[in-house]
Amino acid sequence: MNQKVFAPWDDPNQKPLIQFQNVTKKFGTFTAIDDLSLDIYEREFFALLGPSGCGKTTMMRMLAGFETPTSGTIRLSGQDLGQTAPNKRAVNMMFQSYALFPHLSVWENIAFGLKRESTDKDAIAARVEEMLRLTRLGKFAKRKPHQISGGQRQRVALARSLAKSPKLLLLDEPLGALDKKLREETQFELMDIQEKTGTTFVIVTHDQEEAMTVASRVAVMDEGRLVQVATPADIYEAPNSVYVADFIGDVNIIEGNATPNGDRVRIDWAEGQPEIWGTAQKPVASGERISFAIRPEKVTISKEKPEDRRNLLEGEVIDIAYLGNISTFHVKVGNGQIIKAQSANTRRLANRDITWEDRVWLTFTETAGVLLEG
Amino acid sequence: MRRFSWFNATSLTLGFAFLYLPMVILVIYSFNASKLVTVWAGFSTKWYGELLQNEDFLDAAWVTIRVAFFSSVLATVLGTMAATVLVRAGRFMGRGLFSGMIYAPLVMPEVITGLSLLLLFIGIGLDRGVFTIVLAHTTFAMCYVSVVVSSRLVSFDKSLEEAALDLGCTPFQAFRLVTLPIIAPAVISGWLLAFTLSLDDLVIASFTTGPSATTLPIKIFSAVRLGVSPEINALSTIMISVVTVGVITASILSKRSAVAQQRDEQAATQATG
């Protein structure tokens, strides 16, 4: 079993499909994109993730050609895109609003782009049929956009943007308008289609779960800058900043003073509280102010005091969030800080013993959390 | 609260009487058998028949229709272009001034529009006739077209045009293949409006016309100075019906069809619904 892991970003011999080189985009005095450099590789499913106003949509619109960078260059397969008009780029976009042409049928919508570059009717028809099959829309070919459901429209938009076999497909919040259940199904469908067609996808989303599910790599953005670009697992397990840790999923942040000790770091975080031991990813200076970030699911909660554990905090249950599959306990420890602990509900409700105002013990291993600056 | 009250009923009757009584009298007398306009002598359609024999009136009708057709087509093209640019161009220096200048002729007294056009035509040495009336009517009708079309364009989803560009259209193709078909109802109703405006214009036409071209309104106006004949009544009745049909069609088209299109467009651009 010698399956190769898909990670072209780790291979120095790989040439990136898209290169942002020191790209800055200003709208008047507002800087939407600030001196940003980024490589995206062929066949990647790349997610731009961030809150609204972070510049992710501007990045996408620059790739599509609707905006041009104020400075810096964007290259596609090594060629400078520069001022190339949107209709001259091997890039297609799936719009957030889908932007289906209301006066054309599903079939004509998908054929629209093909008709612009070819007059071969048979070839166009064959390609449209292929797209209809890929997106399971065969039955609806003759319908107008307002005669089909939201999920079907989403697939028409996808089929239309894929029909021209672009080198790069841009997806602007493609699933934002669908309800949760349909969105989850569609995420897997998108991944499936991306794999089948081998197209490079760049998706813009503010939904971190969506980015984590579909993407091979995620770029977390804030105020026009890239904060971290990494695989979903790295983003989640090894965030490089408090911002990323906080933006992706739920996290407890404990601030304290560091004292390195071998490859471990001792953190004194509150008077009269037992210290916390963490593992340093990079050298930490003695006495440095740091944040210790730990995910709630990595904190174990119990009523009995575990023996011989280094990271052990005592507290009182303030709140319980019951989500069905898991429960999150909000525990107030000695100095008043709330620490969240999660446990999977493997037993039925009646059999669980921790409840409000219980005294409980929280433990975690020395490698469970990450140390972050500041 | 939709209760019947005598006050409401009276105001309504008075209001409509004020508006339509003169026209109703005119229509009734156009079916008068007597040659005397004010004396009713029984029902007859003979004046309509005589009207069809009257070469002068038929010529004037033909001139009017030609003027209305050409000026409305020109006005539609220019008005749609102006509306597209003003709605699409976003913000730029003097945008308010530009749109104001497009709409200003709407409130400009017709006498002044007519006079200034007359001076222009004399100034550049253009022989006055059908051509100059067409130009003059285009000038004032394009404002109306532009108002109708731009009100539709404001609610037009810009991402539709971007999608067309993205799929390989030139900006002109995007307009022709996507924008125009979608805003067509507004463009058509703008055209109908321009057509009917041109049909019944007297002031501007009389300023800019020459001896070779007499439109119906000019003809009627000059004929009436010699006394109202039942033929004029018949002719006016025909004009009233043409204009009414035109205006009603225009408003139905712009209302119903634009609403339907907009619904489709919204449905197409929103996932749920």
Image: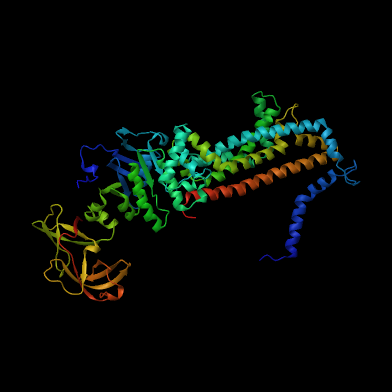
Residue A52 can be seen, yes or no = no
Quadrant of residue B242 within the rendered picture = top right
Image-based side of B78 in relation to B213, left or right:
left
- Quadrant of the snapshot with the C terminus of chain A: bottom left
Vertical placement of A205 versus A67: above or below?
below
State the image coordinates of residue A165 (x, y, percent, origin top left): 38, 38
Q: Residue furthest front?
A: A1
Q: Residue at x 60, y 43 (%)?
A: B185
Please state which of residues B211 and B230 is positioned toward the viewer in this rendering: B230
* Depicted A189 relative to depicted B106: above or below: below
Describe residue B96's horizontal placement relative to residue A213 as left or right.
Answer: right
Quarter of image, res A33: top left
Q: Residue at image x 74%, y 63%?
A: B7
Pinpoint residue B113: horizontal percent, then vertical percent: 66, 35
In the image, B144: left or right of A304? Answer: right
Residue positioned most to the left: A262
Q: Position of residue A98 (x, y in %)?
A: 44, 47
Coordinates of residue A174 in the picture (x, y in percent): 39, 49
- Asked whether A3 or A204 is in front, the reply is A3
Report the front residue among A139 and A23: A139
Which residue ends up furthest to the top in the rendered image? B125
Which of the 4 image quadrants contains residue A160?
top left
Query: Looking at the image, how many numbered discs can be counted on the residues?
Result: 0
Q: Is residue A102 left or right of residue B11?
A: left
For residue A231, say whether it is visible.
Answer: yes
Coloring scheme used: rainbow
